[in-house]
């Protein structure tokens, strides 16, 4: 089955073995696909999504808050991986006032 997912509906993407889970607004269950997180990362618009962990890509527009070690999207807490901190810091520096 083929499911169309709009970029604007994506909250975050999680790697799960050989699959990815795409969590969207308005849906309790994720959309699953047999692909790699790297492949999805290459297809997502760079200015709208950011990889924050080896297993997670988040929609920048859906972030509710950021702490030193995590990103919060709704009631979901995603740990920030050490190698991804600089990218997130650049995003924060760009948008903070």
Image: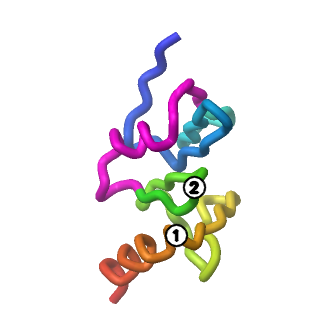
In the image shown, does 90 or 17 lie closer to the viewer? Answer: 17
- Using residue 77 as the reference point, say whether residue 6 is left or right of it: left
- Using residue 27 as the reference point, say whether residue 10 is left or right of it: left
Q: Position of residue 75 (x, y in %)?
A: 70, 59
Say what secondary structure mark 2 lies in.
Answer: loop
Check the image and report above or below for 17 versus 73.
above
On residue 83, which mark appears? 1
Residue 34 among magenta residues: yes
* Residue at 67% from the left image edge and 33% from the top image edge: 29
Check the image and report above or below for 82 versus 34.
below
Q: Position of residue 84 (x, y in %)?
A: 50, 68
Circle nearer the N terminus (1, 2): 2
In the image shown, does 16 or 1 lie closer to the viewer? Answer: 16
Residue 69 among magenta residues: no
* Residue at 51% from the left image edge and 64% from the top image edge: 63
Q: Position of residue 44 (x, y in %)?
A: 35, 44
Residue found farthest to the bottom: 97
On residue 28, which mark appears? none
Q: CA distance from mark 1 to mark 2?
A: 9 Å
**Residues tagged 1 and 2 counted as in contact (Cβ below 8 A):** yes
Name which quarter of the figure residue 94 lies in.
bottom left
Say what secondary structure mark 1 lies in.
Answer: helix
Magenta residues (range): 31-49
On residue 54, which mark appears? 2
Colour scheme employed for the rendering of this structure:
rainbow
Q: Position of residue 70 (x, y in %)?
A: 63, 71
* Residue at 59% from the left image edge and 68% from the top image edge: 80
Q: Badge 2 local density, few (<14 within 10 Å), some, or many (20+)?
A: some
In the image shown, does 51 or 17 lie closer to the viewer? Answer: 17
Q: Badge 1 local density, few (<14 within 10 Å), some, or many (20+)?
A: few
Question: Image quadrant for the C terminus?
Answer: bottom left
């Amino acid at each position: 089955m083929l499911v169309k997912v709009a970029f604007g509906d994506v909250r975050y993407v999680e790697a799960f073995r050989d699959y990815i889970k795409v969590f969207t607004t308005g849906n309790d269950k994720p959309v699953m696909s047999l692909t790699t997180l790297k492949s999805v990362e290459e297809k997502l618009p760079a200015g709208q999504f950011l990889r924050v962990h080896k297993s997670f890509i988040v929609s920048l527009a859906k972030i509710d808050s950021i702490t030193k070690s995590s990103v919060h999207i709704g009631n979901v807490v995603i740990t920030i991986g050490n190698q991804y901190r600089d990218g997130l810091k650049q995003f924060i520096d760009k948008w903070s006032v």
